[in-house]
Amino acid sequence: MKIFENIINHKINTITTDELLKYAKQFHIKITRQQAHDIANYLRGRNINIFNGTDRIMVIKEIAIIAGPETAKELNKLFVQFTK
């Protein structure tokens, strides 16, 4: 299972604006291009482990500042789906 965690974390830590928009559309998350750009810039290179609850909460709080609490809530749902 560790390999899947590494793959998912790597994708999150290297995500682009277009990839984030694609996933948002796929999972019915409303996000603007500017929000996706800002979130992708925040995530890129941070070495975040979304399987660690503390890391995930920290990221969601930052995303709430960047894109608003509703978007952060929706992205948290997506992260939780990835971690199952």
Image: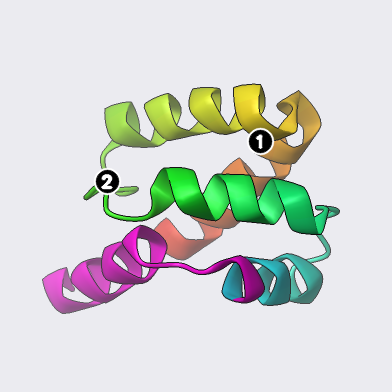
Q: Residue at x 72, y 44 (%)?
A: 74
Which amino acid type corresponds to the residue marked 2 in the rendered image? Answer: Arg
Which amino acid type corresponds to the residue marked 1 in the rendered image? Answer: Ala
Which is nearer the eye, 77 or 37?
Answer: 37
Q: Residue at x 33, y 59 (%)?
A: 13
Mark 1 or mark 2, earlier in chain: 2
Q: Where does residue 59 sit, x and y in percent of width and height? A: 44, 33
Which range is magenta? Answer: 1-18
Q: Where does residue 2 sit, x and y in percent of width and height? A: 13, 69
Q: Which numbered mark, 1 or 2, is in the foreground of this view? A: 2
Which residue, given by chain and number where applicable, does mark 1 sit on? 72
Which residue, given by chain and number where applicable, does mark 2 sit on? 46
Is residue 4 inside the magenta stretch? yes
Gap in angstroms between the C-alphas marked 1 and 2: 17 Å
Q: Is residue 32 above or below residue 58?
A: below
Query: Does dot 2 land on a helix, a strand or a loop?
Result: loop
| Residue 84 in sight in this render | no
Q: Where does residue 34 sit, x and y in percent of width and height? A: 75, 50
Res 38 quadrant in image: top right
Q: Is residue 48 above or below residue 72?
A: below
Res 33 quadrant in image: bottom right
Q: Is residue 35 above or below residue 69?
A: below
Is 21 positioned to the left or the right of 8 in the image?
Answer: right
On-image quarter of the N terminus? bottom left
